[in-house]
Image (cartoon, helix red, strand yellow):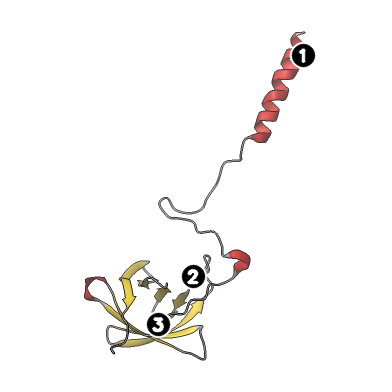
Amino acid sequence: MSSRITFLAASLALLGACTTPAPVVSDVAPGVVDVPPAVDDRQLAFTLASGTYHCDLGARVDVQRDPGNPHRIRIGWTGRHYLLERNRSHSGLPRYEDATSGLVWIDLPWKSVLLDGQRGKPLASECIALPPPA
């Protein structure tokens, strides 16, 4: 009888182990949200404005889009101009980079941000395109 109880207890423990989810192991740093990849690795496409983007702390970024090449934009920042190419992003969101300067422009319909990609710090955030003057 005791062998049956031992066998039953071992079977239940084994069955319980099969239904317990495996621990989640992540290589993402604490406090960083891991965004799942875009469906089928598609990159999202938004219709976004060219023009001057006004950002927090009085910063501004001039953005000119190339209608013939949606994978390229020209950024005006601190009196200099940079050509940024769209990179595939994990989330599918529009992300443009200039490998030489390290500038990164994250482009969203509701706001955008300019980053120092080499240091991982924002240069201009909460950037919003103002409508052209009437």
Residue at image point 53% right, 69% down: 92
| Residue type, mark 1 in image | Arg
From the viewer's perspective, tell me whether residue 70 is left or right of residue 113: right
From the viewer's perspective, tell me whether residue 103 is left or right of residue 58: right
Residue 20: image x %, image y %?
62, 35
Q: In what element is the residue under mark 3? A: loop
Residue at image point 46% right, 89% down: 66
Residue at image point 48% right, 76% down: 46
Q: Which mark is residue 49?
A: 3
Position of the N terminus, as image quadrant, is: top right
N-terminal of the two: label 3 or label 1?
1
Q: In what element is the residue under mark 2? A: loop
Residue 53: image x %, image y %?
32, 79
Instruction: Nearest to the eye among marks 2 and 3: give it.
Output: 3
In front of the other: 70 or 6: 70
User: Which residue bears the numbered disc 2?
Assistant: 93
N-terminal of the two: label 1 or label 2?
1
Rendered image quadrant of residue 111: bottom left
User: Which residue bears the numbered disc 1?
Assistant: 4
